[in-house]
Image (cartoon, rainbow, N blue to C red):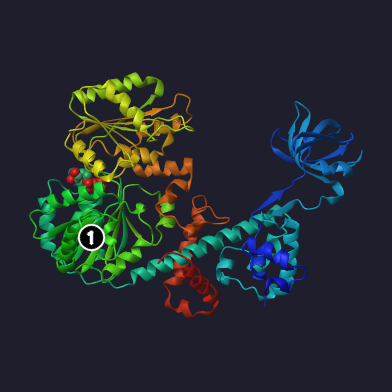
Amino acid sequence: MSHLESIKGIGPRMKEKLNRNKIYDCFDIINRFPSKYEIYNLITLKDAIDNERITIKGKVTSVPNVAFIRRNFTRLSFNVTIEERDFKVSIFNREYLRSILDLGEDIVLTGTIDRLRNTFTASTLKLIRNFKNEIEPIYNLDGVSDAQFNKLFQLSYEEYGHLIEDDLPEYLIKKYKLIKYTQLLKIVHNPVTSKDLVKIERRIKYEELFKFQFKIQYLRLKNKSKKSALKKYDINEVKAFIKSLPFELTDDQKNATNQIMKDIKSPFVMNRLLQGDTGSGKTVVSAITILAVLSSGHSVAMMAPTEILAKQHYKTFSKFFHRTPYKIVFLTGKLSASERRDQLHIIKNNQCLIIGTHALFSDDVLYKDLGYVITDEQHRFGVNQRKKFREKGFNPDVLYMSATPIPRTLAISLFGDMDISTIRERPKNRQKVETKLFSNKQMDLVYMVIDEQLKLNHQVYVVTPLILESESLDLNNAQRVFSDLRSRFKNHRIGIIHSKIKQEDKEKIMDMYQENEINLLVSTTVIEVGVDVPNASLMIVLDSDRFGLSQLHQLRGRIGRSDIKSYCLLVYKEDSESKVRLEILETVDDGFILSEEDLKLRGPGDFFGYRQSGDMKFKKAHIVNDHKILEVARDDALEILTNKESYSRKEFTKLFSYLKSTLKKSNFD
Ligand code: ADP
Ligand code: MG
């Protein structure tokens, strides 16, 4: 009924063009908003700022002249007077304007002015009698001009506008004094004043963030109401284990442990993120809670992002639990067929703690009463993995551990559908890693520090941004640094590790480093997460200005893992502007502050790796700058979702049908 060709002026060719822009019926036309607005605010010379975009009136005083600079590149130039002053105007690839620019013609110019040289570089130029809209909607459509589309909107709206309903409930529109959707449609394609733009922006932002929260909170509540298997753990066993630890838990560790234990005991499924700097003691917390679940008779699976880390966890947990009766199984992707068959047989028929990589979730791995799943460094795993976990057991509780603190403002967007436990406090015996900046002209000093530490029989990491020489980037690469250091420190054993090295060799190298058979390890950021070598006391990051603060903080977390005094040297390019940014690391040692800083300086892009999701592509809203709206939107969404009556109330019908359709499309499970 609302098909495109029902509109006068849309024939097969236009239809094809609209389809190319993902517009398939008239409602798609009505709901496609301008991607931005061009604002032509007429000003006078005294308000103009040189080299900033302005719009101003002028009078043509010379016959335009066209210069053909090269193929498909022309410059039209002519003289104007602007408020009695003479300027020379240039505008590129607009030679066709020559015929309309008669002497004495009044025009409106948009572009940048240079009063020193008396020039004006125009991007747009109009005759004054054609200049009416101060605000022009820009749609950025492929093959359809803005004017054409605006016309199609008018026609579609006349025909179908009366069928449009508001997704937002009326009381929320009133509460925030937003405009209704029908009003929005009236002005979004033809705003007249800057006030209109403000109204448009407020309505769209709120609606986007509210719908996003409505969905994510709905999922959270739905997951929370999923029953999990009952786990009656043995509190005495857990207490004895905590007592056997060679240290006292920090308050944050105790809190996190309690929160997780409460979730485990509850009849509903847990979906929790445990975040804290490397070395803050997350693994210990996970061990306590793993033991609790084991004591309840269920199996537990722990997944690490790499084989090296999985193996390290296997060793750690074997030590932790050596006095307990529980079986610990290591499942890697590289067992021989018969070994694998044996392991799978054990896992299938016995309660155990299984530690491994993605291999844990292959279809042929069956568990005996899987009750708890822990993933270390969860951002390396896809969102869909959660669904996989569920299928492996009866809604096992899930704990995600992450060593990169997420700023609070991002946490509710990125992990709004999870509960979060945070460890901020560090174990008391920790020494602060001393961090110092060095310019790349001071490498001699850096070599001296390396020499010093090696002589003390301590170990060293040297991190580079690249593996091999790059033609386009003038940066240190692991291979060259490795050869260079090898010739400089002949009496020491130097190793190299990066993602191009074979898995087996990687493990061998890491083992050797762990045993201090390699004294200095050159690497790319593959060592970033998790590796634990307490004897390493020096971390050197070359071209450190290429990394985010959080990432450097992570790298720094590789050292200072014992009572040995440790140093982190950040080498930056002499002319790099990043020095000020890097200096923060000399004084700040709190991952949360650094991640907030990253967010301020580099934007949220760095964090989206954690959770790639089309759900977070907003048209107007900005996930960081608009976090206040995000927070009220979350509360509004929760208020509706937690009230049982909402689901049958008429005022929410539109909202729930939106939810249904969007869940169908999204990849959240
Ligand atoms: P994370 O998993 O957060 O990187 P771990 O749990 O591996 O941290 O802890 C890092 C090191 O600190 C381990 O050697 C661990 O035994 C030790 N540790 C953990 N908690 C404490 C504590 N409360 N006091 C002293 N040492 C601790
Ligand atoms: Mg860890």
The C terminus is located in which quarter?
A: bottom left
Place residue 325 in its image quadrant.
bottom left
Which residue is more in the foreground, 417 or 398?
398
Residue 385 in sight here: yes
| Secondary-structure class at tag 1 | strand
Q: Residue at x 57, y 63 (%)?
A: 176
Please state the horizontal and vertical placement of residue 423, each as a whole percent of the image: 29, 49
> Where is residue 121 shown, x and y percent of the image?
75, 35
> In the image shown, does 21 or 140 lie closer to the viewer?
21
> Given the image, on which type of amino acid does mark 1 rest?
Ala
Rendering quadrant holding ligand 1: top left
According to the image, label 1 marks what residue? 301
Decide: is 291 above or below 519.
below
Q: Name which residue lies at 75% across and 26% down.
A: 116
Residue 534 appearing in the image: no
User: Residue 57 appears in which quarter of the rendering?
Assistant: top right
**Disc 1 C-beta below 8 A from ligand 2:** no
Would you place residue 610 above or below residue 79 in this image? below
Q: Position of residue 191 (x, y in %)?
A: 71, 57
Q: Nearer the viewer, residue 1 or 224?
A: 1
* Mark 1 neighbour density, 10 Å: few (under 14) some (14–19) many (20 or more): many
Considering only vertical position in the picture, is 524 above or below 402?
above
- Answer with left or right where residue 475 lies relative to residue 111: left
Q: How many marks?
A: 1
Residue 353, percent across and down?
A: 18, 60
The N terminus lies in quadrant? bottom right
Left or right, residue 599 beside residue 253: right
